[in-house]
Every structure is written in structure tokens, then in C-alpha cells.
Amino acid sequence: MTTFLRLRGWATALAVSAGLLAVTGAAHAQQASITGRITDAGTGQGLTSARVLVTGTAYSTNSGPDGRFTIRPVNQGTYEVRVVLVGYESQKKTVTVAAGQAATVDFALVASPFQLEEIVTTATGEQRKVEVGNATATIKAAEVVETAQPQNLASLLQGRAAGVSIMQGSGTVGTGTRIRIRGVNSINLSNEPIIIVDGIRTDNSSSTSPFGSGLGTGGQQVSRLNDINPDDIENIEVVKGPSAATLYGPAAANGVVVVTTKKGKGGKTKWNFYTEQGRANDRGNYPDNWLWTRTTNGQVSAANPRCRLQDIAQGVCTESAAIKTTDNPLLSEETPFAPGWRMQYGANVAGGTESLNYFISGEFENEDGVFSMPAPEEARLLRQSGRTELRGDEITPSRQRRVNVRSNVTAQLSSTTQVQVNAGYLYGRLRLPVNDNSVLGTITSGYAGTGRRIVQTGTEAQFYPDGRPGWNTGFTNPGDAFQNLNDQDNERITGNATVTSRPLKWLNARALIGVDFVNLSERQNQRFNEGPNFADRRLGLNTLTEFRTYNYTAEGSATGTFQLTDGLVSKTTAGAQYLRGLAYFTQGSATQLGFGANVLRTGALAPTVSEGTNENATWGYFVEEQLSWKDRLFLTGALRRDQNSAYGGQFGAVTTPKASISYLLSEEGWFPRGDFLSNVRVRGAYGQSSLTPGVTTALAFFGTVTAVTPEGVGAGVNLSNFANSQLKPEVSTEYEGGIDLGLFKNRVNVEATYFYKKTTDALIARTLPASIGVPTTYTENIGSIRNKGFEWVVNAQILNGRDVAWDLGFSGSMTRNNVLSLGGVPPIIFNDPQQRHQEGYIAGSYWERKITGWQDGVNVGANSPIASWRSFCTAAAATQAIKADGIIAGCEVVVDTGFTETGSSFPLNEFAFNTGVSLLNNMFRVQALFDYRGNYRMANLTESFRCTSSQNCRELYDNTAPEAERLGLAARFFHPSATRYAYQEDGSFLRFRELAVTFNAPRDWARAITADRISVTLAGRNLGLWTDYTGVDPEVNGQGNANFSQRDFMTQPPVRYFTMRFNVGF
Amino acid sequence: MTNTAKERLMRLRPLLGLAAAALVAPLAGCSGFADDILEVNTPDIVTPDALNNATGAAALRSGAFGDFAFAYAGDNGGTEGMILTTGLVTDEFVNGDTFSTRQEPDQRNMDFNNGTLQGVFRNIQRARESARRARLALAALPSPNPVQIAEMLNLEAFSYVLIGEAYCGHVPFSEDKDGQVVSGDPLTTDQIMDVAIAKFDSALAGTTDATQLNLARIGKARAQLNKGQFAAAAATVQAVPTSFRYALNYSTSVGRTQNGVMVFSWVSFRWSDANNEGTNGLPYHTEPRSAARRQGQAFDAAIPLWLPLKYPDRATPITLADGIEARLIEAEAALRGGNSTSMLSILNALRSAPPSYAFTNGQALGQVTDPGTAVGRENLLFAERAYWMFGTSHRLGDLRRLVRQYNRGAETVFPTGVYVKGGNYGGNVNIPVPVDEQNNPKFKRESCVTGQA
């Protein structure tokens, strides 16, 4: 029955789409046409891919490879034809078409570095940017890929769109990224934008799946965003907020990343081959591990071996040179780091005829991470195992290997109807090392190791064959850590078919159906007698997890364009959309596998299995009306209404409106347009978008559990959730206004935007009294969050000569976030707990009790009102330590009694500066990108943990360490408050993100090998870092892609890449 | 009509057509179309209406057993239970972990914001609510099974006893009433025991099943002991044979069914058996009934790891109540009644002929002699209780009773002085009700005094 209903739903959705197409009617009888050629005014060469639009009608087309275009059929009449092409000033001409005749109109476009009339993709189709009342960021991905060589889609976006924050979790190859656009909108739901590829919704999970992952990486996760091959992308548009994203439907409140893949172009078939080769290096400046050993009669005290400054202050031990040792396993001879190699081989072909275009591509990519088995560890493992060589997965525990294939075909079925079929396939294999919050982690163990190497008898793992002592790590030697395998295989198919038709002069219709399918297989494995010696792991363990997710999109829309009066054009669009997301997982896990066996069924303990299902469906419809006055004033209004399977039973549908205005002031006759002020546009927009609750949040339900009753092991149930039949989506409302300026004949382009965004009905998980047990929370629509900010983009063509051209770009954003209301719920405290959602403050900000100073020899901490739960400042302990000795004792530290907000956990200020120089008619191109993030803090839990748990940080022993560090430690470890204040550091940084040098070989060189073009690019990434942050890198998150939780905790920092790309086109 | 007017009308015609098209979708929404295409599968969950039958009640009962066993012992290494947590606060276990939230109970310096303790409290409260929910479902069946209802009453009542012994004297008990949370009034330790006794009495009155009767008797007597009703407690357990034992079963199946006391020590090395902890602790390692084995270092690589031989396997059952406890209650009643001879006699009877289920590490237990002083006899009795009932969440209640009922100073019975990982022991003698309870408007943080036994 369910299947029937689903099929019925699909059939109905398609029927609606088809119905919208059905109004296409019969082809027009009169076969008149508009034809012409578009050329570069300077060179006379034909310009391909220019957009040709006929004002007040649905007529449009693109120019072919020689600049020629034809629009057919066209009704007789007089028309205004406009041509738009990136890099040129748009141009319009009037043409009169007689019945059954071809009217010719040619265009010679003048180059212009920046203009307002480029074409952007919106929810209702393509529009000129000038018609849209919102700020939209467009990234010409194809150009970026060839010149900057981003490793993945996230790095392609990084620093290229104002207001779009790309936060990578670590430098580990294959790990993910958090994207925040104009701040954070939701406390409870994901703040990730949705990803649209060629019109369909795709999996944008920032973890493996809705169920989490079967991998045990310690913290890092994978972003499905990075499955998309940058080499297949033509351009990316970032729709930043609800005012622009209304018509994208539910979950668009966080913004939309619209990816358009490359398409074929008519004319000569073009082949392109490329390879990229390069290396990655770990650049972490890891701190030394310290140990001053406490001795009694020359012997190390086993029970309490450390002689810390606090112990010296209490007279327990005394400082002497003999007791001081340091070690740095991560930078030692046994370092687990080695250069990683990155390689890419790809080819694509594009071409076609007037009726059929195609783009077909294929790519193989392999990147080894920067971890490799240290030679001494390899020797140790070989000796211990008796093997003659180690397996590849032991030697290289970090690797990503991918194969991408894409085929995009466009067929012109008739003069008015076009069908486009796009299909992408990815096969990926990712091997992830363990780090962050795991005792199995290599970096973790290096950070946590003791400050000296001790040969411990009976534990052979501590020895190397040459007799030298081993790491004496905090937890696990690298050799053992690398024997713990985390593999993820990924197959992904993204495909869609789109039919567009222009049956009538005034009507365009479009229907689309597509699916994004992800099939993941994860395996966590440790073989018998191998790997870290924790719990019963060395008896062998295996966890296999299978995930499948499907995202279906079906939609149809029709747009009618009418010239209502002279100068007034109406464009009306109506459409409907059906979205269905399905996610499933099954998992089997077994431990104590035994010798020689490596499969679930051999587990001595019964293998455990689990499964999960997560389904969600949305049905929505919309109507949009746009009026344009004399092609300079554009007014848009729209409504969208959505129903979703996750809404509470008593909640029906959500209606979201939008409205915008765009006014090209400089087109008015009275405007003093001149060389200085070339173009001026003012714009404003208002709109709403929603976020959908979790699929079962509205329901009361019990979960199944395995239980042992007096009768034996069986299934039982326990309460998991209380019902909320009133549950509805969160709604974000945004207002934005801005101005776009073209200065100095459009050689300088300025865009400035202010936005104000407010989320109401925000879902807040009200914490229930602990005495109810479980469930722990009850989710209600009671919160409110505000973001407001300012964004700007300044691009300038400083020099534009044939021999020397120089361009500059400076973009940025300043966002202010505030939790307006939690609906009366007390502050929500999480992550260690250092972060809070609290009314009147930044969502997820850091809080602590501030350290205000210290007084040598004065007991200022004993009377702290919070001393009751810590005993360090009890009279007995304090008396011994409180001396005017220059050593900061815990009770000498003054700490505020109340918590205060110390800063945002995500950057509030972001600036990007890029510049490029082209020499000798672009034979050489040098470009650089600097990336700044500021006004945020990072919890340096790595150092806090080292000082308090591993007890190996310098400031614990060395009184010449910076006073701020000793003070922070004393407050954290020896003060009653245990405040982490000093470890919530300013994370602001400036990074030299990219430097690329491209050599475009002279045409003669290319012709020598019968090619059209040859280029070579040398690129470096993450080349420099300027920051006051004392940890290894402020751009990490040990919590992976968590919604809010953020900390630096034993995390691999970003790596430095040097790559070379060789392109040849035929 | 003029040509111009006609043209205008022609221009408007498409607009009307589109407006009509735009109306199609909303109309479809009204016809049940949307309901059809928005239907989704949710096979992972069980809705409440599916439980209103015998099968559903049985599933709730199984769930209650699972929740109680989990809250009591913990699971396979992720979440600790009452035994492990109270064992840290007392002299039974020491913390071998790196988590400061597990060091706090061991150091008797607990913060009510402690997230780990939050889970422990919620889990025992969930066990209580699950047992109550299952009891109500069983009672609502057309042919209720009185034994199973008594069984659920006993689990519910034991939840109260465990909470009352471990937490401060200001503990609310909230309830789920038809899907709505009703915040509970905070109860003092005495009041908690009163509720437990009432539930044990209901169990006693509702069944003739010997197992459930004996379980209820021992539980009731334990609650009476906490209230200082020594003679009444002895009378309550008089009918319980020494051979009686009610244990919670564990398995090697999924993690939640495993003996968490075993896993946290033998498998994950995060708990280590204590020995003479903090000056006042008992020498458990050399005592057969709480014997431990040394095996390298604990998880934190800082303290030696001692493993409890009493719990060698993930499936080792854990006693909830047994005949030994019944006799020990009688022994204490004798001591309080001034009959130390009888107390010694009972203690030695147990030692000379331990029941078959008792763990003595294969060793014979010699006789104990009269220490000769009142304090010595109290120490002897409580030591015997500690050894016989090691690792069953009795010790914290006993130490608190020593303070409350025997006028001992807390620092003479709880671990005290210099803490092994730095600093000193704190002054907690019970566990604070966690911060989440502050969402209950009836709860007053200042009334939850962790320094008061």
C-alpha cells in the first residue's frame, strides 16, 4: 500500500509537471526568426556563449562558437534584443521581424571587466543579475580550477564569496567542512546550506549520514559536498539568505549553493587533458612534552613522578637540572608524518551540433595523506609479527582515491523544446586516520606523551630493534595506531533530466526530475594481535556499516512573459516541487575475532547488528511575479507554500513570501553618468524561508532495546520521545539592501549589502528535569535568533594592457549574531561545557570565568564562593603553596565568580584579498589569495588537556614560561574555579591561502603537437599563517563538522600543498 | 472592440491562464493528494498506541529490566551505573580514567554540572519510570499477572532505595502522565525511603511468589535500615532464607546488556579496585570476597590497575538482594539492640558456611572475634557488609549511615587527605542532583547539600 501511495505521489507530481508543459500547445505556424552574429568590438572575433534575450518575450538563446545565433520561431513584430556576456558590456538593439522572414541583427560588444548584467541561476530559471534584488555571489569555477587548483569543492569556495564562511575541520585528506552563510540561524537544526546540482537537491550531509558514522576517527567527519568534482563545474552561485532562497523550499533558510556543471557547446569538438601532481606537507609546530621528574634518593617516584611548579611551591620537591627532560615524538626521528602525494589525471570532451551538445568527462584522483609508518615502527612491527613486509594500509593510513565520470547531454528536440540529461558517477575510497578525541590517535598520543622516553621491561611495544626507547606516548605508538583501519567506500550517482520548452512567444515551461544516490560502505577493523592495546581491541574487531541515501527531486514550472505596456514587462512563474529524502543504514559489529579471522562471524562475542530508517517528504508550490519598468526598475513578489512529513499533526503548511526591488539608477536620463560613475544600482529584498524539524521530533515514540529478563535475552521498549503535535518549521525572515557601483568605466566594481535576518519559531530542545530520566529534552518552537551584518565586494582592474594586466579584489563580511529568545529555557550549555546558547548573546559562544590577575604570596582564592567543590584552596593545601616565590599557586589567582561571554565560536569578521597579474597577453598569470578570519575564539583543549591530564606542558614545570600561560594553567588546574579562560584564545588569523603561477604556452607551441592550447600551473596552498593563537593552528575543529561544538583537540592542522597542473586542449 | 483593446485583452489572457495553473497545486493539496505523497516509513520506532495490549506490556516489562540493569551496572564501556559511581565516591573503586568528570566523584569534589553524573542520575530515574510504566501497562491488561506487577514494583522501589542512598536529601521524582511531564516534589532521604517501603509493601501484598516476596522483604528492610528502623528491618527479613539470591542477569550480547562493572575494569581499564583508599578505605585486595588482581596500569597510565575477581565476565550476574544481606541486617539489629554476641554469631555463621552463590574467591573464611569496643564492633559489622556486598552499590549508603546513625565524622569513614592524582579529597558525602533538575521549578539547588549524610 505504501509503495502504491508513493508511486501515486510520484505519478501525481510528474503529472503536475507534465501539465505545466502540456500548455505548450502546438508549434507556432509562422517560422520567422531573428538571427545575427556577436563579435568582440576590439578583435572582431565571434563570441561564443553570449546570452541573447528578447525583451518582453520568452525568446532567448545562446550564441554558437563563431558568435552566430538564431531564435526561431518568432512572431512578427518589433523587438528589443539584448546580448549579455561576462566580460563585456551588455548591448541592446531593436529589430523588426516580418512574417516568415529572418531579421538580422549583429552585435559588437565592448570589453568591460565588471558589469551588472551577467546571467545568474535562480529557483525559477535564469535571470540577469540586474533583475534580482539580492546580492548573489557567482564563482566561475572552471576558471578557478585551472588557475588555483583547489583540492575539493570546499577549498574552491574558500575566500571567494563574501558572507560565506568555509571552516575546515582538519588537514586530514578527505575530511569535511562546515559552511555558514550569513551566520547561524538555528540552535537545534543544521546550519549547513542546501546544495543544488543542476536543479536537484543533493546530499549535503556534513557527517556521514543522518545516523552518524560507523567509523571511529576520533572527531573528523566527511562532507558529502566534497564528492562533487570541481573540474566538472562551470559555475557556482551562492544564494545567501531567506530573502533570496524562498522559492528553493524548506531547509533553504541557511542559504543555497547552486552548482551548474559544464555543458557542451556546438561547433568543433574540444578535447581537454590534464594532470595534477603535487605533494602535501604537515607544517604543525608541535610543542615539546615536558617532564621534571620527582625523585626520592635518586629514584623516580612511581606513584607521583612529577615535580611541578606547584609541588616546588609546596616544598614537595626542588628544581634541579638533573630532573628536566623534554621529548617531542611528533617531530622526532620516529615522526608519523611524511610528505603525501597528490595526483590527478583527467580528460573531458565537449562539442556537438545545432541539435545535440555534449560534455563528457572522466577523472582519477589519488591523494595520500601526510601520515606514514615511521621506519623504526615498521621494523618493530615486523619483528613482533614475524612478517617480512607490512600491508599497504598499515604503511599509509590516510588516503583518498576517487574516480569521477560525468556525461551531460543536451538535445534540441524541436525549435522550441530542449531536453537535457545530466549524469555524474563517483567511486571513492577513503582511509581515515584516527586523531582528535581518541586514545587511538597518533597526534593525540604524540601530544599526550611524557617528556622522556622510558624503556619499560615487559612491554615490547616500547622498544625499537636497535634498542632505543620508543615513543612512551600518552596512549598509542604510531605503528599500532596505523593498524587500526577506517575505510569508507562511496558510490554516488547524481542525475537529472530537464525538459524546457518555449511553445509560445510568451511562455517558457520547464520540468525536471532527478535523483542523488549515495551508497556508503564503512569498515572499522583491527586484526587479532595488532593495533592499539586498549580494552580487548587486540583480540580483533570489525564493524561494517552500509548507508544508502536517496534524494529525489521532481518539479515543474511555467513562466509567462508579457509586454504589458511600452516599458512595462511582466514575468509570471508558477510551479510545484516534490522532494523526497530516504536514508537507511545497517551495521554489524563484532569483537574478539580471534587469530587469522577478520570477519564478523568469527567474533567470540555475539556480533551486534543495528539498522535505521529516515524518510522525509516535502510538497510545495509557488507563484512569482516580476515587473520590470524600462529595463531599469524590477519588482518581484512571490509566495511559496510547503507541507512536510515532519511537521506536527496539528500543523498544516508553511507559507513563505518574498519581495524584492532592483533599480538601475544609472539608466535614468537624469543620472549624471560619466567616466567616474558608470553604473549604479540600488536593491532591496525581503523574504522568508524555513527549516524542517527532524523526521520524528513531533512524534511520541518508544525505542527498542535489548534486555536481559529473568527469562533470557529479548527485546524490550523504552520511551524515547514525547509528542509535540504543534511542531512546525523554523522560519527565517530576512531583509537586505545594497548598492552596486561601477566606477571608472566599470573598471572598479563595488557591491555593498546590509542584511538583517531573524529566525522565529526556532526549535529549542527544552531540557526536562533529570528526575524524569529519559527523554532528556522536549522540542518546541520557542526560540528566536538574529543575524545582521554587512558584506562588500570590491573588484578593480588596475591595469588592463596587453602586456600587463593587474586586478585586485577585496571582499568581506561582518556578521553579528544574537540569540533573542530561548523561550524562557535556561542557557543551553555544551561542549566540555564551554559553549552556550544564552539569550542576549551569540549562539554557541564561549563562556568562562575570567582571570583578573594574581598576587604573589597572597591567598586570594581560598574564599572563592565556588571553592566548595574543589579542595585546592583549602587552608591546608593553600598554606604550603602561598609564598612570595614567583610561582603562581592556584590560590594566588583572582578569578571572577560569574561566567561571562568570552567570544564567538565562529568568525564574525571575514576578509579575503586576492590579486592577479597577467603578463605578455596573459602568457603568464600570477594570482594570490589571502584569507582573514577574526572576532572569534578557539578553545585550545589540546593545551588544557596536556597541562591537566597529560601534565606535560612547559608551563607546568618551567617558571620562565610566559606568565600568561602559567597564570592560565594555575587557574585551570589549581584554582577552585578550574576556569578554562586562558585556553579560550583569540583565534583570529590571516592565512596566505593560495599562490598560483600559470604559464599559457604560445599558440605555436601548442600547434607543434597539434593542440589548441597548453598551460602549466604551479600552485601553493596554505603558505603562511599569522596569528596570536598559541595552539598549532586556529583553523581546526576536533569536533569535526559539528553544528556548534568547536575546539582544537589533538587535531591535524591544515597541510601545505604544492601542486603542478598541466593542461592541453585539442 | 478596437484593435488596441483586443491586443490588451490578448496580453492579459496568458496571465489568467497562469493564474489558473497556479491554483492547481493548492487544490491538489486539499484533496488528500499531499497526505499521500507525504507518507513516510518509520520502522525504527514504536508508537504508544502499539503498546496497549499484552505484547506491548511484555515489551515494556523487558524494557524496564533492561533499563534497571543498565542503570545499576552501566554498559560496555560508555556509560557507568550506580555501582561504579557510588564505588568511586567510597573506598571501593578508584578512577583510572582521564576524564575529570570521573575524577570528581572519586575525589569527592562533585560539581552539579558534571555531565557524566548527569547520565548516571537520569538512567536510574529512567529505570524507575520504566518500571512504573510497565507496571501500569501490566495492571491494565484484562488478566493481570500479579507476579510481574510485584516484580515491577520491586524494581521501582529499588530505584528509590538506590537514589536515596546515593544522592543528597533533596531529590525530586518526576513522572510521565499521559505524555506530559509532571515535575516531582523534592523528597528527603527519609521520604524517599518511605516511598520505597510503600512500594515494597504493595509488592508484598500483591503476590504469593516466593522470589518476589523475598526480594521485597530485603528491599524494604534495606529502606528501613536507612531510616534507622533496625528492629523492624530485622523483622522484615526474618522469613528470608540465607540461600535466597536475586541477581540481575547480564549477557555478552549488545553492549547495554553487559556487566558494566566488569567492562569498565577488565576491558576498558577505567575503574580500578581500591585498597585502603584515602586513609579510611578498607583493604579490599587481600580480602577473598573482594579480591582483585593486578594487571599493569589503568587507562590513565597513572595508577595501577586492579581488577575485581568477583566480576570476571561480561555476563556475570550482579546481586540486587540476597540472604546474606538479610542476615547482615539481622546482625546490625542485634548490635543496635545491644546483643553483640548475636551479631558475632550471625557474622560467623555466614563466614563458616557461605551460601553457594557467595563469592569468596575459593578461600575459606575464618571466624571473627569480638573487637571488644562499640566502635570496633560497628567497624567489624560495616566491614563485613562492605566485603560481602562489594560492588553492589551498598557502600555509600553504609558510609552515610555511619555518619548519620553512628555519629561518625565523615572524614573518619570516607576517603580523605591527599588525593592520588593531585590535590586533596573534598567534602562530598553524597552525589549532587545534576544541573538539569533545575528545570524543575520545585527543586532548590541550595537544599541539595552534598556535605550532609
Image (spheres, grey):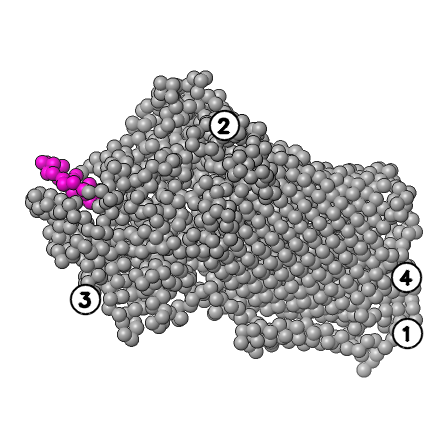
Q: Nearer the viewer, mark 3 or mark 2?
A: 2
**Which tag, 2 or 4, sits closer to the chain's start?**
4
Q: Is B204 displayed left or right of A1040 in the figure?
A: left
What count of labels does the image hold? 4
Q: Quadrant of residue A974?
A: top left
Q: Nearer the viewer, mark 1 or mark 3?
A: 3
Q: Is residue B400 left or right of residue A248?
A: left
Tell me the distance, in whole angstroms, between the alpha carbons under discs 4 and 3: 100 Å
Q: Are marks 1 and 2 in contact (CB under 8 Å)?
A: no
Q: Position of residue B436 (x, y in %)?
A: 37, 50
Nearest the camera: A410 or B250?
B250
- Which three-letter amino acid code belongs to the residue tagged 3? Thr
Q: Residue A1054 versus residue A594: which sits nearer the camera?
A: A594
Look at mark 1 in the image and give the residue it sits on.
A99
User: What is the magenta range?
Assistant: B365-387
**Residue located beneath label 4 in the image:** A36
- Asked if labels 2 and 4 share a chain, the reply is yes
Residue type at numbered disc 4: Gly
Residue A774 horizontal side relative to residue A763, left or right: left
Q: Earlier in the sequence, mark 1 or mark 4?
A: 4
Q: Are marks 1 and 3 in contact (CB under 8 Å)?
A: no
* Residue at (58% x, 38% y) in the render: A388
Q: Disc 1 and disc 4: Cα gap in Å?
A: 17 Å
Name which quarter of the figure residue B108 lies in.
top left
